[in-house]
Image: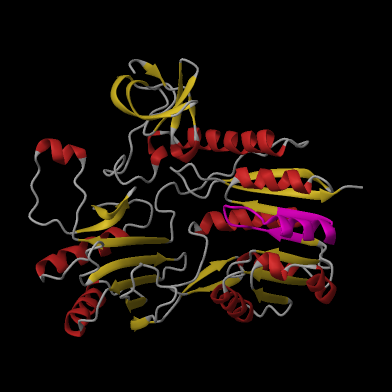
Amino acid sequence: MENVTITGVAAEGKALARVDDCVVFVPFVVPGDVVDLQVLRKKHNYMEAVPVAFHAYSEQRCEPKCRHYGVCGGCKWQILPYQEQLKYKQKQVMDNLTRIAKVELPPVSPIIGSQKIYGYRNKLEFTFSNKRWRTWDEVREGTQFDTMNAVGFHIPNAFDKVLDIEECWLQDDINNQLRNEIRRYALEHGLEFFDLRTQTGFLRTMMVRTSTTGELMLILVFFREDREARIALLQHLADKFPQITSLLYVINSKANDTITDQEIHVFKGKDHIFERMENLSFKIGPKSFYQTNSEQAYELYKVARDFAGLTGKELVFDLYTGTGTIANFVAGKARRVIGIEYVPEAIEDAKVNAELNGITNAMFFAGDMKDILNGEFIAAYGRPDVVITDPPRAGMHEDVIKTILSAEPERIVYVSCNPATQARDIALLDAKYAVKAIQPVDMFPHTQHVENVVLLQKRG
């Protein structure tokens, strides 16, 4: 299809155009671009295509900062100026609430943008592979490599191929220094990179965690034990990067990369780092969940706390509490807070963080939300005055919504990373609750993702 004008922004970081009454979804373009398209997939009411030639560039377009843009699959909106990104994220929230919730809505507050649009993440994970992904440019130019080993990000839809990452600007530059030095050392010393198909090799994955306190955690995951090689590499990193406060390693010989069920070993320093928020400290281990944009997490939690309208007399239920960050954050303004979370390890972190901060009015329970939160639970611990809920992308289970409606808290603060499922749940809550405030918060610049906080007030 030739001379197609891109007209809007769609889901998954793609843009869209309309050709002969058919919607076409296109990655790596922005509204106003005029392009030739190659159709990859055609359905009865939409098509998916890729740009093969540009006739005109949009005035909205800007140059991406990352040299890997368009290949690694992340940060698809780098070619949009940040203010334009915020405009489309705000529109995404409004469209979902209007189209799906179909309830009476107040005006949406202007989105809270991130002060940092690069280097904002506190955690990145990289994969080692002996099957380096060759980009189309490298294939066309016949580029030859001395090694096919790579450490970087998985290519979308190619589980065993990894794009070798030289620079990633999502986190502080220390992630680049660590990753590039590990690659250099491994190649120099002949260390085996992992083969994801045959499940063989030595170096498997790495994780870098930073915090606003200046602490630094590096976790290296090996597929098998080679004590001499492992110690030599870890000692080299300890010597070269004395700023590492937590140097850890894992031997993971399972078929998958998850380390939540693996033993973590300390090579140097502590087994954790700390994050701070106002007067609170949060202990973060290698398995801990914590919002990946620390500074924006503070903005998000302030909105949730403000919407809760706490006076010190309320019983608050914090559903999907994770490591209890929101629960502990609001505890100082509540009579009592009860946090519920599916992952037992996260609940243990929540208890540790409560104790660490001298919080004595918070209780935490582990288990499936729809099984724990029921009439018996409310009879035992009390009817909540305020419910704060921050579910996963799938939203809340219908049984959980029914229990909330039955409990009839005065206010519900709904924090969501998926405005579409949030809108679906708001439609169900509309039987007893009216939407009183809407506040989008951008946690992930250069991506299509947006957080949204909604305040619902009991009718009558």
Q: Position of residue 365 (x, y in %)?
A: 67, 75
Q: Which residue extends farthest right?
A: 460
- Name the quarter where the N terminus is drawn: top left
Give whichever of 382, 85 is nearer the camera: 382
Q: Position of residue 299 (x, y in %)?
A: 60, 54
Tally of numbered discs: 0
Q: Which residues are magenta?
A: 387-413
Residue shown at 62%/57% (left/top)? 391
- Report whether 433 appears left or right of 128: right
Residue 243 seen in the figure: no
- Report whether 129 appears left or right of 269: left
Give whichever of 338, 177 is nearer the camera: 338
14, above or below 60, in the image: below
Residue shown at 65%/47% (left/top)? 422
Image-quadrant location for residue 366: bottom right
Is 401 a magenta residue? yes
338, above or below 62, in the image: below
Q: Which residue extends farthest front?
A: 44
Residue 8 seen in the figure: yes
